[in-house]
Amino acid sequence: FLPGLVSSGPADKIKGYNQDGMVDRLHADGYDIYSVVWDNGDDHVVNNSVLLESLIESINAQKIANDSHFENIIVSWSLGALTARHTLLKMENDFYDGNATAHHHSRIYVSLEGEHQGANVPLGAQYATNPNTLGGAALSGILNSPTATEILLYHFSHPSNPGQGAHTNR
């Protein structure tokens, strides 16, 4: 269990992922399955990436200790896909640049509905989120979260010209 993660461990403990017995079949075929639920899913991708890197390193250390030479298969969706992609790329670059002692040892990366090219919330809808109204306060909090500022193609608070570009976090 790593700080910052709500849970990390065999996915069969999380019943929702075992649709049609998929997790059971994979586990029976010899796969170890881990599920990650972020403690703060709205945090910056880079911060969650640090946690995922720690988890991958921990899993790889367990595999080495058990004389396992199978490579990881990473499946992720939505913002988790961006975090996984960032993590794998950083680990790859660090390894080949000589800044890391271990490789990520992942052979397959599957992205399901990851916002790799950004997300689009119409600017009119963003401007309509008045933080002084009940619904607007909730939407304003979401639109100004680190996650939203990183993935929105256009953000109403663009510093040099509001509504004309991405937030500086992107």
Image: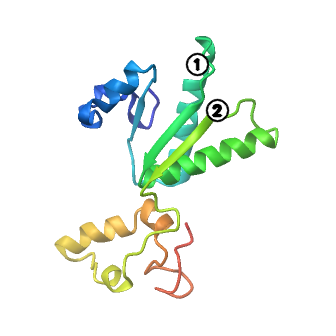
The residue carrying pointer 2 sits among few (fewer than 14), some (14 to 19) or many (20 or more) residues within 10 Å by Cα, namely some
The percent coordinates of residue 79 (x first, y second) are 44, 54
Q: Nearer the viewer, residue 134 or 7?
A: 7
Instruction: Name the residue rendered at 52%, 62% in the picture.
Output: 116
Quadrant of the image occupied by residue 113: bottom left
Query: Callout 2, which amino acid?
Result: His
Looking at the image, tell me whether mark 1 or mark 2 is earlier in sequence order. 1
Judge left or right: residue 140 versus residue 159.
left
The percent coordinates of residue 149 (x first, y second) are 47, 67
Q: Which residue is mark 1?
A: 63
Quadrant of the image occupied by residue 16: top left
* Disc 1 to disc 2: CB gap under 8 Å: yes
Instruction: Name the residue rendered at 63%, 16% in the picture.
Output: 64
Q: Which residue is mark 2?
A: 105
Residue at the extreme left: 134
Per the model, the C-alpha gap separating discs 1 and 2 is 11 Å
Q: In the drawing, what numbered circle is on residue 26?
A: none
Instruction: Name the residue rendered at 52%, 73% in the picture.
Output: 167
The percent coordinates of residue 147 (x first, y second) are 44, 60
Residue at the extreme top: 66
Position of residue 125 relative to residue 5, above or below, is below
Q: How is the image coloured?
A: rainbow
Query: Callout 1, which amino acid?
Result: Lys
